[in-house]
Image: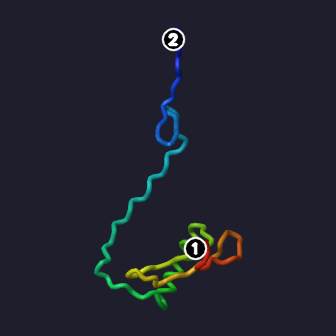
Amino acid sequence: MLRMLRTTAVIAGGIPAGSAQVATPRPHPAASPVTDLTRVAPQALTGERRKAFEDSLAELMDAAGVPGSAVAAVQAGEIVYLEGFGVREIGGTEPVSLDTH
């Protein structure tokens, strides 16, 4: 007497072959071309440039729903900017600091 074995093929992601996929993932946006900045002189992050940078960070965090972030900028191997923004958790009051983990 022959014994019948039932097998199921599984594709990547653990979805059985032949199963309908619930949702097709959205494709990632195309990466923007990389700009070569090797011959561009760095500009100091002070005054209006610093304010514009920090305003942009605040807008990006708000758009992404990020309550807080620590940001560092490194130039020629040296930290030239280090700042904490926002709070540690949504609804919280404890600010993000340079020591936040």
- Quadrant (top left/top right/bottom left/bottom right) for the C terminus: bottom right
**Callout 1 environment at 10 Å: few (<14), some (14 to 19), or many (20+)?**
many
Q: Which residue is mark 2?
A: 2
The residue at the point 31 percent across, 82 percent down is 40
Percent x, y for residue 6?
53, 22
Q: Which residue is mark 1?
A: 69
State which tag comes first along the sequence, 1 or 2.
2
In the image, residue 81 sits, relative to residue 25, either above or below, namely: below
Q: Secondary structure at mark 1?
A: strand
Q: Quadrant of residue 99?
A: bottom right
Percent x, y for residue 71?
52, 77
Percent x, y for residue 10?
49, 35
26 lies left or right of 36: right
The residue positioned farthest toward the top in the image shown: 1
What amino acid does circle 2 point to? Leu
What amino acid does circle 1 point to? Ser
